Image (cartoon, rainbow, N blue to C red):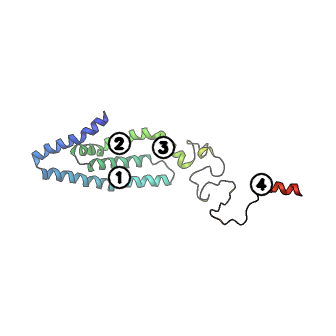
Amino acid sequence: MSALLLLMLPLAELMLATFLARHFGWPWVLLALLAGAVLGSLLIRLRGAPYFRQAMAAMSRQEAPTEALLNGLAWYVAGVLLMIPGFITDVLAVLVLLPPVRRAMVSRLQKLTEGRLVNLQTVFTGRYGPTGSAGAGGMSGAGAEWPPRQGQGSGVVFEGEAREIVVNAPVLEEPPRPDAAVERRIDS
């Protein structure tokens, strides 16, 4: 059903543009479409980008950026809808820009993403839930938190053995054959 509506949207936009062009003329319709595209790009740059900067600042403080991120998303959606040529999408963009509609959209998206943001908090902080009862991936002890706190180093420390493998290294001597070692033992 939604795919059918999505396919019919360009046809409806073309029919509406033709209708408006008959009444106002093609130059005015084209000017209105161009103005919508410019206004949409300005909305994204001037109104949407600051919300995403706020979200990044909140994440750097290890706080959930939910509200700033969703408000920025609403402004981006309105900007993209304005940039799409057509008057139906412009009306939808204006509806998204209305404060009551935008607040309702943000609150609905917050409810949809609450569980997912807890999972993201686990990934970014290494703690499950508000108590921080388990480390990232079930790890405990050193390196259980991710990202590491200040002064903790640059990452997780893994203990183990390492062996250097040199590719195309010159062979100094031929290794002994296993059967040659047996022969020497028998002779001595």
Which residue is outermost to the right? 188
SS under mark 1:
helix
- In the picture of the structure, the residue carrying the numbered disc 2 is 103
Dot 1 crowding, Cα within 10 Å, few <14, some 14–19, many 20+: many
What's the distance in space between the residues labelled 4 and 2, CA to CA? 78 Å
What quarter of the picture does the C terminus occupy? bottom right
Reading the chain from its start, which is encountered first: label 3 or label 4?
3
- The local secondary structure at tag 4 comes to helix
Cα gap from disc 1 to disc 3, whole angstroms: 21 Å
In this rendered view, identify the residue nearer to me: 55 or 175. 175
Kindly identify which residue carries mark 1. Answer: 48
* Residue name at image x 73 percent, y 62 percent: 174
Q: Please report the residue visible at 79 percent of the width from the left and 54 percent of the height from the top.
A: 179
Left/right placement of residue 148 relative to residue 110 reads right
- Sequence-earlier tag: 4 or 2: 2
Cα–Cα gap, marks 3 and 4: 60 Å
Tell me what residue is drawn at x 60 percent, y 50 percent.
145
User: First in sequence: mark 1 or mark 3?
Assistant: 1
Question: In the shown orientation, is residue 27 left or right of residue 36?
Answer: left
Q: Nearer the viewer, mark 1 or mark 2?
A: 1
Residue 12, located in which quarter of the rendered image? top left
Task: Count residues near mark 2 (Cα–Cα under 10 Å), then give few for <14, some for 14-19, many for 20+.
Answer: some
Q: Nearer the viewer, residue 97 or 4?
A: 4
Q: Position of residue 159 (x, y in %)?
A: 68, 54
Residue on which the image places disc 4: 178
Q: What's the distance in space between the residues labelled 1 and 2, CA to CA? A: 15 Å
Residue 28 image point, x, y percent: 14, 52
Q: Are marks 3 and 4 in contact (CB under 8 Å)?
A: no
Q: Amino acid at mark 4?
A: Pro
Q: Which residue is mark 3?
A: 117
